[in-house]
Every structure is written in structure tokens, then in C-alpha cells.
Image (cartoon, grey):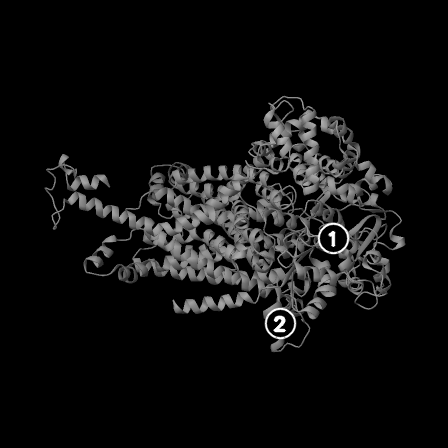
Amino acid sequence: MKKLLILSTALTGLAATAQADITVLSWGGAYEKSQVEAYNKPFTAETGIAINMTAADNPATPIKAQVEAGNVTVDVADVEYADAIRLCDEGLLEEIDPAILPAAPDGTPATEDFLPGALTDCAVASIVFSTVFAYDASKFPDAPPATIADFFDTEKFPGKRGMRKGAKVNLEMALMADGVPADEVYAMLETDEGIDRAFAKLDTIKNDVVWWEAGAQPPQLLADGEVAMTTAYNGRIFAAAVAESKPFEVVWDGQVYEYDLFVIPKGAPNLDEALEYVKFATDTQRLADQAKWISYGPARKSSGPLVGLYEDGKTEMAPHMPTSAENLTNALPSSYEFWVDRDSELNERFNAWLAG
Amino acid sequence: MADITADIAPGPTAGSSDPAAGRLTTADGQPLARALARAQARSRRRALLLVAPLLLFVLITFVVPIGQMLYRSVHNDAFARNMPNLAIWFADHPAGTEPDEAAFAALAADLQKARADKTAGEVGTRINYEISGTRSLFTSSARNADDLQPPYRESVLALDEDWGDPRLWQVMRGASTAYTASFYLAALDLTRDETGAIARVEENRRVYVRLFVKTLALSALITGICLMLGFPVAHLLAVLPLARSNLLMILVLLPFWTSLLVRTTSWMVLLQEQGVINNMLVAGGVIDDGSRIRMMYNQAGTIIAMVHILLPFMILPLYSVMRPINPSYVRAARSLGATSWTAFRRVYLPQTLPGIGAGSLLVFILAVGYYITPALVGGASGQLISNLIAYHMQDSLNWSMAAALAAILLAIVLMLYWLYDRLIGIDNMKLG
Amino acid sequence: MALPIYASPLERVWHWTYRVLCALIFLFLIAPILIVIPLSFNAEPYFTFTEKMLSLDPTGYSLRWYDLLLTFGMQAPDAARDGGWWGDVWRNATWVQVAKNSVVIGFFSTLLATALGTLAALGLSRPEMPFRRSIMAILISPMIVPIIITATGLFFFYSSIGIRNWGVPYLGVILAHATLGIPFVIITVTATLVGFDHSLTRAAASLGAAPATIFRKITLPLILPGMVSGALFAFVTSFDEVVVVMFIAAPDEQTIPRQMWNGIREQISPAILSVATILVVVSVLLLATIEILRRRGERLRGVTPA
């Protein structure tokens, strides 16, 4: 029995070292890595606060579940725009006063330095990311796909498709592929006919789709040869193509771009440290640093000029950013006004469609 | 126990109230029957005392949590709590009353309150469970609720004419009390129409019944395959000499002891389009590179991996029934002129029925509740009801719906468990 | 099962078909478990056999995925491999952290399940036990109830009692895993008590032995093999459990299977296969232990193997 006691004390001691100071919930994979390198490591070095990174398919849902169940373990989360607005509207997030955010190096206050819409009552944007489609160049040596319509054309471009399991972005892309101009997509989706039309377009490839949930999955599906093309977050494809030299090509036609934002769930166990982290991570230099690790555009104007080369020291980042001019010729800014109210309804319909 | 006492202290004299009692006494002069009864009661208490800590533990960490969760399937106060004025109006007016100016005034007041308290999303979500497309009605109306003024009826309808929909009022009436059966209705693809009668939901939203049927059908299929594969193997193990069968038994027990995730990973490695099996088939010239077989991210993946994982649960009970079967019965049948098939069918098979029953029920029970494997290898078509419960728990956050589905699944499983106990007896469950 | 000499030709054909069939089913059972072992030594980031591997070229094999298990999540994986590097591994490497969590959770939940389960099994196997059947049904039910239902129930229950604020690390997961392990302890310990001769304890009592002595000297040696194999079952149950961990564990309480779940969904690199290989080795060891215990138990009780 005494041995047992000693053993159990030893095990408890062993467990205590695993404690982390704050918990950040993000999207995993290459994106998480860029956050660890650009934000977490310097933050821990400066403040001594250790950071425990965890991943979710979409951090907004565990946040909502935790706050509603009264069981919050996450201090900071990284969410999409519509989710940030909705969670804030529902009183599930701590408010973040933009005045506490650090000013740009030239003294421009944060409220003017951030891109339009990047600061909301409860959230601070860090990056602009985009959902694009990408293909395995070795599968299409002669005539590679070039437009969003090609993604839905399995006759001309045979092979399985990867798509995110959810309504958002898929409906927009389906309409654009069906010939709807980018600036009319949301007006169309406001109507029942528009939604039917989007689902009808999705129907045409339904049997060829492999559905993904976590952002790290699509590059893996491409690498494994499970799909010939897939929708994906552009930074993930960039990371696989540049860092792992995979023959993946991004098609920017029909891309849907938006902000990713930091939020603090209501009742976060370490509110002060969480605020420190958000302030630290969204200063000019940090946002520029992140672009060294992944091809997402910083949400501050003052970070723009500081973005240069990928961490390999030779790849120019600008052409890989969702916001560069040549990538924006047929691009759609995601509408949070639309998704904030319609997200759950359309996902419900999407799931019924998927099961049917 | 009563019959034991009766044996020792026979006849009508056994009762302790009987003054004539005490023909048989213990050393200290007590009637034996009473002493025995007391001793019996003491040992019963002691036996109970030994079990009590665990029983209490299981009640607290298992039975109570599940009960509490199931309570959510009939209790949801998201609407009643946040829309108090409307709840009062519904309580005061019987079903079928046309919403009057007072009703719209209550609605306007509640929407203003919802805006102030940031609860419009919660309320809208609750109604949206039953009428798709209403969440946005609540959130956008609440956003503009401060502009509402008398006459409220016109004012609210000007905001959005959907507020005049009688079905919406019917659903709000249903939600205005915290206790509801609507999640069970929804779990059976049913709903209430504007008159309050129960009706089926639209074609494109019927999901749950189909999935329950699919879960049961797939579980039955998996059980059948397990039986087909498990029977010959168990038979071989049972008739081989013990030393050799123990050696072969390792091949059954090793999978049994190997982590579920390891086994699922292995199947992913084997079944992928670029995986080991497809590569072998391509290399062997059976199929060409362009027509690789799709064995994963669909029902086939779920079935193959689950059969592999559940097969030991079939083989072990079969084996423990087959081992003691005396081979001389079959030999006798053969010597009496039965063909080997007849001898097997009429003599051997009936003796293995308890094993078949135990193995099949166990595999079926475990299969019905499977979650991990379908989630990883099942794709969209290979999902079972557990995956949908997890979806409502983790993604749609419709917890009452998850609870209602869980309650139905639990009822199915407990029924099978009861059947297992009746037919086989829980105490006869063996491991390894 | 030798073929009798009077067997007809058809029966001979059937006899051998049957043998081949059984061999194929055994292959189906065991091949998926063995296949991951060679693949985990792949030098390439694929999980299929490369040309080099098939031709047994040593350069086709490597330990790089095992190395990745150590370096993944480290602060400075490229530093010189001295004491400081290993300290970094111990403190920060993700797989090492989750392995530690798994061991801690597994150890305490096994301890709890075995202690409570054995006591209850002793009570349940007494002939005087009232409501035996229904109590047994309740205690075995955690094994039968779909894990997703248990996990969701615990998620709400633990949230409502605020178990995380009690300051005991891992408490929720340990209690849950103990509950899941209890049926195994009960089944194995009860099995060793089947045919238990109660006159042994009565004889000891009549000779003046105290209950504690009776337990230590008579009951314990008899049920020990059952206790240990029950404990092993309980440990494996906890060690392999992922759904409850997914629902109720705090971010710093993730376990090996939870991390594998992440890895499988995001990328099945051969690193996952090297974890799988290690786990297969662990299960071989456990199986061997169980087998030794079973034989010992049967010898002790004088039961000839059925």
C-alpha cells in the first residue's frame, strides 16, 4: 500500500507539470503552427505565460457550447466573422475595447490602423483568409482547371472533389459556378429560388464529393490522392505546396474571403492574460510576422509593408495573398450580414440534403 | 430463504409470536428460527454493504448524469424564460385564439427585452428548431424592436409580415411552456401543423427515422457477417486440441486487446484509394490505376472496420458454448445414417444456439451505439445515429434534440439488454 | 479434428475448403494489426509499401516517425540532443504529454474501479445478496450504454456541478473512466468466485479468524487473478477511451487516443502508425499477462480448463 501511495504521489506530481497558463483554441495544422511561431513563442518569452494550443473544426461551436453549459476552459479563440458577430449578439463573448489595442509604430491609433470592419465590439481581426479551390497539378497536366465552374465540371475534369461539410462558402461557390456574378450572389441567396439553385448545382457533384471538416484535411486529401480537387483555406494549400513541395495549384477564381478574429469567451478562466495575449498578437509586427509562416493577409494597414518573404527566405508572399489585386478579379467578400442570421437554418438544410 | 427456515423449524410453531415456539433453540435459549432469521438478515445487510459503495458511485457518476441529460429532451425553457409577456398571453388565451393587439403588444415588449438582454438568438433558435427560417426573423426583428409603437399589430407586421403566420403562433404557443414533447416528435420526423395536429415534416427534412432504420439495418448486417465469419472460426477453435486452439486463440484475442483507434487507423491504411489493398490490386493487374475501388468514406468502410472490431465479441461466446459440446452426439448421428450436413443441422447447430444468441445480441447491442469508427471511415453515407447525436451535441448545439435521440437509442439498447439478460443472463457474460 | 477415414470425397473437399476459409478469417483478424508495424518504419511520408521497402532495401526504412513523436511540440527540436533536449521532450513534446495524461488517468481510474468493483463482486457473489439480478444489471450497464450517451450526460452533469473548480486535476475523466471500467472488474472477479466454497471462510471463522484475516488469507489469493485481469481490462478501457475525453476533458487533459483521433482526421502520416505500433506492442504485453494470470488462476482453483 505504501508503494502505491508513493507511486500515486509521483504520478500526481507528474501531472501538475502539464498545466498551462492560458488556452488558445484555433484551427489546427499549418495555421496553428503560424500562430505558435509568430505569436505564442515571443509572447511566452516576453511574459512567461505558457500557452496551450488546442484545435477545433470551427472554434465557434465549442465556445458556444462551453459558455451555455457554464463550463469555459478556453481563454482565447480564433473565429470567423459571422460567428464573432453572432456570439457577441448572444452575449457569449467578453467585450474588447479597441482603445486598449497597441497603436501602429507611427502612432496611428489602432481604430484607424485596422482595415475597415476588422474591429467589432467583441472581436479583433488578425488576418484575411480565403476559401479557394486547389488541384493536384499532376492530375491535370494538359488543361488545368481555371474557373470555379471547372470545379463543378466532373466530365471535363474527372476525379473526386473535396468540400467543407457545411453550407457556408459552398452555396456561394455553387452559384458563382452556375454563372451568377459575385456581386449578386447574396441577393440571390436571400431568395428561396436562389438557395434551391445553389443546392441544385451542388447536386450535380454530390456523389463525387469527399467532405472535410478540419482545415488540415484538404491538403491531406490531395496528397493522398483521395481527391483531384478540393476547396480549402488558401494558406493550407500554400503551406503544403511551398513547405512540403507538393504539386498543388490554387485557383483564385471564385474565391470567398473574410476576416478571422480573436475573441474571448464570457467567463474565460484567465481574462487578464487573455487580453494581454490579444493585444500582443494583434500588434503591427506580430501580424506581419505571421505572414512569414502562412499566406494570410494581416488585418492592419501598418503591417502590410512589413510583409516580405516566406520563412524559407526566397518565396515572395504577395502573390499568394487573398487580397492581392490579381487574385481579386472574380472574388467574393463573405457577407457576415447574411450568415449571422442564416447560418443555422442553411446548415440544417444542408445536413438534410447530405443525408438524403 | 423462507424455505430454509421452514425446514429447520417446521410446522405452524415456527412463528416467533407463537407462545409455543422454541422447540428448537440456540445455546442461549433463543428460538432457532429467530436467530437464524437474524443471522440471515445480518449477512444480507453485509452483502448489501459491500455492494453499496459501488452502487452509489455508479448512480452518481452514471445513472444521474444520464437521467439529467434525458430531462433536457422534454424540458427547454429558452422561449418561456426570455419571452415572459407572450408566455402570459398564451396562458390566458386558449389554443385557437387569433393573436389580438394585446398579443402583438406582448410580442413587441418581449422583442425589446430580447434586444436588451441579447437573447433574441436563443429564442429564435428555439423556434427555428420547428420552423426552419425563423431564427433570422427573431434576430432581425429584435434589432429593430425599438422602433415598434402602437398599434403594435400593424407595426410588427410592417417589420416582417411573417409574424402573421398562424403556424408560427402555434409553435410559439407550444414553446411558451418549458415542458414539451416536440423534440420527440422531431426525432420521429413529426411536427405539429397550424391546427396543432401531428403531421409528418416535409420530405426533404425527414432524416431521423431513416437514420434509425439504417442504424438498425447496418447493425443487423454487421451482426450477420460476424456470425458467418465467427461460427467457423469458433468451431475450429473448439474442436482443435487445446494446445493448438490456445495458440490460435491469440489471433482472436490480440485484436480484442488492441486499441480501437489503432484498428481503425489500420483499416484506413488498407482501404484508402492509395492504400495497401488498392495498390496490391493495381500491382497485380486486377484493376487499372484509374479505377481504384472506393472502400472508405462510405458505408463499405463502416461495415468492414466494424466487423473486424466486433468479430471477437462473436467468437468468444460461441467458443465458450462450443468447447464443451460432446463430439459423440454428432458421431452417433452419423453412425445412425445421417449425412454430415444433417448431423450438423439437426444435432450440432441446436446445441450452439445459446452461443449464437449471446454473441449476436452482444454484437448487435455494441454496433447500434457505435460512434468512433463510422465517424472516421464512414464518410457521409456511413454515419450511424450516434454520429447524429454527436452532431447535435457539438455542431448544431440543439441539445434537446440530441437528448431526445439519445433517449430513443437508449430505449432500444436497454430493451436488447433486457432481452440479453432474460435469454443469457448477465452473470454469464465472459471476457477473454 | 482429423478427417475420419470414412469421409466421402465431397467431405474431403469441404474439409480443406473449411480450413482455408478459417485461415482467411484469421488473416482478416490479424493482418490489419500487423500491417501497421512495417509501415511505421517507412522512410517516405506514405502509408503504403514503397518499392524500396518491398525489395528490403535498408534505405527504405527509417526511424524518422518515431523521432517525430519525440520532437513534435517541442520548444527547440533542433537543439543538440543533450540533457536539456530530453528535458524539453519531457516537458513539451505533445505525444509525451498525452502519454503522461493517459497513464495518470488510467492508473487512478483503474485503482478506483478495482477497489470498488472487487468489494461489490464479493457482495454480489454471496448467496444472501438481495436484488442481485437488478443490481448486477445496473452495474454492468456502463459497458452496454452507447458511449456517446454516457459522454453527453457527463458533459452536462460535470458542467452543472462545476467539477473543474474543485481543484482536482483530471477528476472528471478519472471518475468517468472508473465507471466504464467497473463492469470488467465485476465480471472477472465474479468469475473467479463461481464455485467458491463458502465453507472455507466459515471454517476459518469457526477457527477464530478475524474477517480481515479471512479476507487476506483465503479470499484474496483466490480472487487475485480475477482482480488483476479485471484491473488490466479497466486500464485498457481507460487507455483506449476517446469519446468521454473529447466531451469532458480540459485542453491540458488530452490523452493518447484523443491525440490519435486528431492525427487520424488531419493527417495519417506514418507518425500515427508508429504510435499504433507502440500500442500494439503494449497490447501484446497485456495479453501475455492476462494469459499467465488465467492459467495461474485455474491452477490455484484446481479448475481444469473448460
Q: Which residue has dot 2 on it? A: C88
Question: Label 2: how many residues lie within 10 Å, few (<14), some (14-19) or many (20+)?
Answer: many
| x and y percentages locating residue A255 in the rendered image | 82, 48
Mark 2, chain letter? C
Q: In terms of secondary structure, where does tag 2 sit?
A: helix
Q: Which residue has dot 1 on it? A: A123
Q: Quadrant of residue B210?
A: top right
Number of numbered discs on residues: 2
B108 to A253, vertically: above or below? above
| x and y percentages locating residue C29 in the rendered image | 52, 52
> Relative to the observer, which residue lies in front, B41 or B164?
B164
Q: Amino acid at mark 2?
A: Asp
Residue C218 visible in image? yes
| x and y percentages locating residue A177 in the rendered image | 83, 41
- From the viewer's perspective, tell me whether residue A33 is left or right of residue C229: right
A205 to A50, vertically: above or below? above
Question: Which residue is at a point 15% across and 40% down the rendered structure image?
Answer: B9
> Relative to the observer, which residue lies in front, B58 or C95?
B58
Mark 1, chain letter? A
Q: Nearer the viewer, mark 1 or mark 2?
A: 1
- From the viewer's perspective, tell me whether residue C298 is left or right of residue B27: right
- From the viewer's perspective, tell me whether residue A163 is left or right of residue B297: right
| x and y percentages locating residue B294 in the rendered image | 67, 46
Q: Quadrant of residue C114?
A: bottom left
Residue B189 visible in image? no
Q: CA distance from mark 1 to mark 2?
A: 34 Å
Whether marks 1 and 2 lie on the same chain: no
Q: Residue furthest front?
A: B150
